[in-house]
Structure formats: C-alpha cells, structure tokens
Amino acid sequence: MATAWYCGRSPLLLPALSQSRLKQRTPGVHSCSTAPNYNKKDPATYDRETPQILKLAVSGVTELLRLFSPSDQERDIAKQAEELPVSSVDDVLMIIKSDYENAYFVTGNFTSAIYAEDCIFEDPTIKFRGKQLYERNLKLLVPFFECASIRLRRIEKDINSDSNFVLATWKLRTKLKLPWRPLISIDGSTIYELDREFKIVRHAESWNVSALEAIGQIFNFGSSGG
C-alpha cells in the first residue's frame, strides 16, 4: 500500500474503486482471474448515466483552460519521450506502481513512454484519444488543487483474459483552490489495457460516485474540513 502526499501549489487528479477476485502473488501486487466487473460504474457505460450536457460542459471547460495555459507546457511534455525496455505485463505494472508512488496524479509527471500515442483516456465525464492531450490535461489540473493525497490501495494484473490489463484501485483526497476550499474525496480505479507490444491503449477510470455527485462536491460549501 503506497500513499503519496502533496501539499502546496501543485495538486492531484481524479480516481476510483473496483473489486475483483484476486490471487495474491507478491505484497501489494495481485493477479486477476477475470476482467474486473465495474457494474454500472464501468467507464464503458458512462454514456448512459452521465448527462450529455455535463460531458459537454466538462469538455468545454477543459478546452478553455488549454487555450489559456502557458505555452511552456509543451516543453514539459517533451521530457517524457524516452523509451523504456518493456517486455511483459509485470514490467508495465511495476512502472505504473512507481508512477503512483511518485504521485503522478499530483504532479502531472508520469511515464508516457508506456502509453500508445493514440491511447484512449476516459472517465465518467470525458473521453478522448491521445497521450499528449492527456499530459496537457494533467498539467492544466495541477494548479487547482492543494494539500492533495493519493493512496494506491491495490494493483493487480490479469492472468486468464483475452487481453492484458493492469488494474489499480486508489483513493483521492484534495482541496480545491476556491474561496470556500471544497474537499474532494473519491474512491476509484483505473484499468490499463495493453496491446501485444505491452503499450497501454486504454486508460479508463471508474469512480464510486456518479459524475454529478463528484462535481457536486465542488459546491459543498461546508466540506472544507481540517
């Protein structure tokens, strides 16, 4: 179990919770006998449960932030270009685990070399393609969080499915830099689907709350806590 803390000018991103039957192999690393069942929280079904107007609003705000973001973000993103020797699901799992330990949700710095260029990224509010766009979106979120923590609860891999995947479950807790300092707390999971070359081709988040409930936390004026 790894916990990453960050308190200052840079923040944290979103996360989610999922359960599956596990066979423990090494401490903190597990294997799944079947693909995880997200039930109604599966990102693949978020089109049915998230109002279209909410998804359009999230996409619009993201695009506005991108238009007004500093141009030097492109130089930061370029630093992630180096290739890594990856030859198995275990290699990918350990890199992802290291990224969590280094709090990539908080800093926006992650190992982009293990992602396919046209990787699909999705959560209950948005879906898009391209790892460079994901990198930019992470960088856009960083300045809006403070005193954020991300705890990796479990990381696991498949053993008998048709496609390789890694599943990470985690808990996010952060305040937003708004006058009333709302507290955001979400349990979540991210599934990382791999191709035959062990590149991540799909990065899908699932949350323990609906998109409306998650965004509603922003407007909870009495949630600032200690």
Image (cartoon, rainbow, N blue to C red):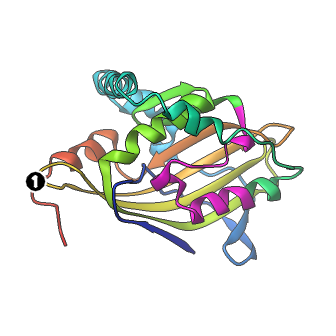
Does 57 appear above or below 183?
A: above
State whether residue 116 appears in this view. yes
**Corner quadrant of residue 102:** bottom right
169 and 113: which one is in front? 113
Q: Position of residue 161 (x, y in %)?
A: 79, 47
The mark total stands at 1
- In the image, residue 25 lies at what x, y percent? 78, 74
Instruction: Look at the magenta stretch and give its main secondary structure.
Output: helix
Q: Quadrant of the N terminus?
A: bottom right
Q: Which residues are magenta?
A: 94-116
Q: Residue at image x 50%, y 34%?
A: 73
Position of 73 relative to 148 (above/below):
above
- Disc 1 marks which amino acid? Phe
Residue at the farthest right position: 87
Q: Residue at x 81, y 57 (%)?
A: 91
Q: Residues within 10 Å of mark 1 (few under 14, many from 20)?
A: few
Quadrant in the picture for residue 9: bottom left
Q: Which residue is mark 1?
A: 221
In this image, 22 relative to 102: left or right?
A: right
Of residues 103 and 92, the one nearer the viewer is: 103
